[in-house]
Image (tube, grey):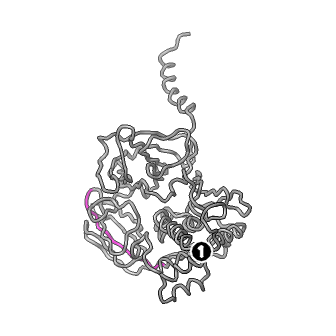
Amino acid sequence: MPLRSSHWLCLGWLLPLLCVSFAPLAPRPDYAGLYRDVAHLDVDTRREGDSLRFYLRLPAPARLGPGHALRLTAWPSYEARQPLWQDSVPRRRQHPIPFPNGLRLSFCVAVSRLPSGTVLQLSTSQPDAKDDYQEPTTTAWLRLTDAIMARPFVLVDSVGQPLLRRYVQAGEPFGVDCFGLYQPVRWKRYAVSPAPALPPMTNPAAMPAGPRTLPVLDSASTRPGQPLRFAEPGLYALRVGGAGGVAPRTLALMVAANQYPDLTTAAELIEPLRYLTTSQERQKLTDAPNPKRAVDKFWLDIAKGNQTLAKELIRRYYGRVIAANELFAAHKAGWLTDRGLLYVVLGPPPSVRRLFDGEERWYYPDGSVDGGPITYSFRPRPSTFAPDYYELVRRPEYELLWYAAVEKWRTPPTALTGPNAPNALPAR
């Protein structure tokens, strides 16, 4: 029997579904690459009417054009095997601005294509269908929450370029760039004493509960478009909006002392040692006539007088602290967070998976006492002050593993190589 036109219409409707059904499944991404201590592809957003504007900073040497297109892939979740859609941003829709250390650009995507909860992958390189590794210099991932989809402003530096970070240094000028009319900004500074992460074997029932509310130390309003500069380090909340019917939106901001994420003072060098030392050892370093020299002697004693080894230990340990500050900055310095704790002591995770519910799992292939694999799980605990915060699932069986990891730092071999060295990121 010949096919009628209605049959052809049905086939035309089914064909795209069949193509999707039989399309090869993408490998589950390994997000460990995004935690490498290298320059990253940074992303921020701003809602502009029916569109969401993306701001990108591409690290040098950044190249776009033939063979280096800007690609977007929308996924229903981090663990999805098939995307919702894939597209590329043509050159005419990009607005590049060359910078000495890379390239900045922006583009818009219709909000109708970005339902809340979508996970967006941005890439400036040709993806390898057989490789799940995520290269941080060319790939970024962003989960589009309700707050991201609604925020009609972006933080900018002193020359009006997007900051693409949620911290500023004390005294650093910055601004709030709103879509449409400039909006009034009201800020509050909260009383908070950032506590370091507790070891992974700590009993959750014994952990101190956080305060239900944070006392406000001071607050003020600024004129629309006026630059901001906070002299006091601490945790701030910016409330932007209220003019012309624009609903106010809140964004948390950490104001850091000195040269964050770098470490420049003796106190900043001593504090991260709490993961390896006793309180008495740290107090002795603090009370020394020359605390910085005392820190050097601490590492030299660990290296048994080997200056080359001591310098390598210092470079590696504090390099991880600085990297954690960049990667995990939230309502407190990155090294103080749960992920920063493991990153500093155990090293960058060789493999990372993100599950449908947002849980993140770090795999260390030789992290157990007998040299076997070990997994650490982090569950998302977002809040107004820390929308990208993760909490470690603590277990008593981590106790021996933790003490063994600390012991590797306290009694290193004569050279930082081999299975007894503090974990280092494998080469790719």
The picture quadrant where one finds residue 210 is bottom right
**Quadrant of the drawing holding the N terminus:** top right
Outermost residue to the top: 1
**Total numbered labels:** 1
Question: Of 157 and 315, which appears nearest the observer?
Answer: 315
Query: What's under tag 1, amino acid-wise?
Result: Ala
Q: How far across and down, in percent of the image, does residue 335 sit?
A: 52, 69
Q: Is 188 part of what is drawn in magenta?
A: yes
Question: Of 89 and 264, which appears nearest the observer?
Answer: 264
Mark 1, secondary structure of its residue: loop
Location of residue 300 with respect to 351 vertically, above or below: below
- Residue 397 falls left or right of residue 346: right
- Residue 260 falls left or right of residue 301: left
The picture quadrant where one finds residue 32 is bottom right
Q: How far across and down, in percent of the image, does residue 399 sit?
A: 70, 70
Location of residue 408 with respect to 123 vertically, above or below: below
Give the residue pinned by disc 1.
303
Q: How far across and down, in percent of the image, does residue 257 sit?
A: 40, 76
- Residue 310 falls left or right of residue 44: right
Q: How far across and down, in percent of the image, does residue 356 sit?
A: 58, 51
State the residue at coordinates (44%, 79%): 265
Outermost residue to the right: 370
Crowdedness near tag 1: few (<14), some (14–19) or many (≥20) residues, C-alpha within 10 Å = many
State the residue at coordinates (35%, 55%): 46
Question: Of 140 and 15, which appears nearest the observer?
Answer: 140
What is the magenta range? 180-192
